[in-house]
Structure formats: C-alpha cells, structure tokens
Image (cartoon, helix red, strand yellow):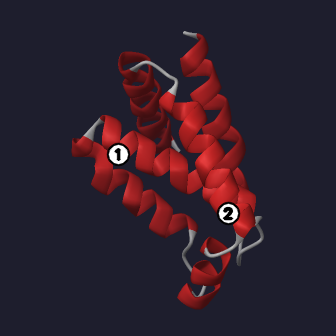
Amino acid sequence: MKANRMLCLCLAITFPQLALAEFQFTNQSLGTEQAMIDFCARIDPGTATKYQQQAEVLAQGVPSEELDKARSTDDYKDAYALASNALGAISKPDAAEACNRFLEADKQD
C-alpha cells in the first residue's frame, strides 16, 4: 500500500506540472514523467498506448526540438534514472494497481 501512495504521489505531482501551457515544466519533471510512463507501460503492456497518448497530450504545442533538447540534458537523464530506480523497487502487483488507478482517474477528468 505504501508503494501505491508513493507512485500516486509522484504521478499527482508531475502530471499537473506538465499540463501547463508551452513547456513550463522543468527538465527534471519531464524526466520523472517519462520514467513513470515507461514504467507503467512495462508493468501492463496493454496500457502502453494510453500512457503514450497521455504524454503526447501533455507535450502538445511544444516543438519537438525543445523536447529533444530537454531530453538530452543531464537534469532530464538524472531525474529519469532516479525515478526509474525508485519505481523499480515497487512490487509489480502494487505498481500495476497504482498505474491502473491513475488511468482511471484520468478518465474521470
């Protein structure tokens, strides 16, 4: 249950920041967000498309050059690695439940 709270907290903190207009998020939050999307997609491959669609919506309106530049920074890479390692410590059943809850919450918005 602690893992669910940790993952939900990470998702709750990161995704609203990314929903702001025109790349008003940090390279760190972008790295964390992408690590969570990739993690949840690996946990349940059937949801991978839904997570990738969410990432595309969040980055909508941001030129791909800016995204590529952000993804090449050390801040992005460090945040991605840190989030990936933390998420990897969560048990698969707890992680799958938390990821599914996030998708369900997204449907309700």
Q: Contact, CB < 8 Å: mark 2 with mark 1?
A: no
Q: Amino acid at mark 2?
A: Tyr
Q: Which residue does the image show at 59% across and 52% down from the upper left?
A: 33
| Disc 1 packing (10 Å; few <14; some 14–19; many ≥20) | some
Q: Earlier in the sequence, mark 2 or mark 1?
A: 1
Residue 2, x across and y down, in percent: 61, 12
Picture residue at 60% right of the left edge, 32% below the top: 86
Can the viewer see residue 51 in this picture?
Answer: yes
Q: Between residue 57 and residue 48, name the one nearer to us.
A: 48
Residue most extreme to the top: 1
Residue at (42% x, 50% y) in the render: 38
Mark whose residue sits in front, 2 or 1: 2
- As drawn, the label of residue 104 is none
Quick one: SS at disc 2? helix
Image quarter of the N terminus? top right
- Residue drawn at the location 64% of the way across and 24% of the way down: 6
The residue that label 1 is drawn on is: 41
Nearer to us in this view, 97 or 30: 30
Q: Residues within 10 Å of mark 2 (few under 14, many from 20)?
A: many
Which quarter of the figure has residue 52?
Answer: bottom left
Amino acid residing under circle 1: Ala
Can you say whether 103 is above or below 62 in the image? above
Which residue bears the numbered disc 2? 76
Q: CA distance from mark 2 to mark 1?
A: 19 Å
In this picture, residue 8 sits left or right of residue 28: left
Depth check: give the residue in front, 64 or 78. 78
Which type of secondary structure does the marked residue at label 1 adopt?
Answer: helix
Q: Is any atom of residue 19 visible in this view?
A: no
Which image quadrant for residue 66?
Answer: bottom right
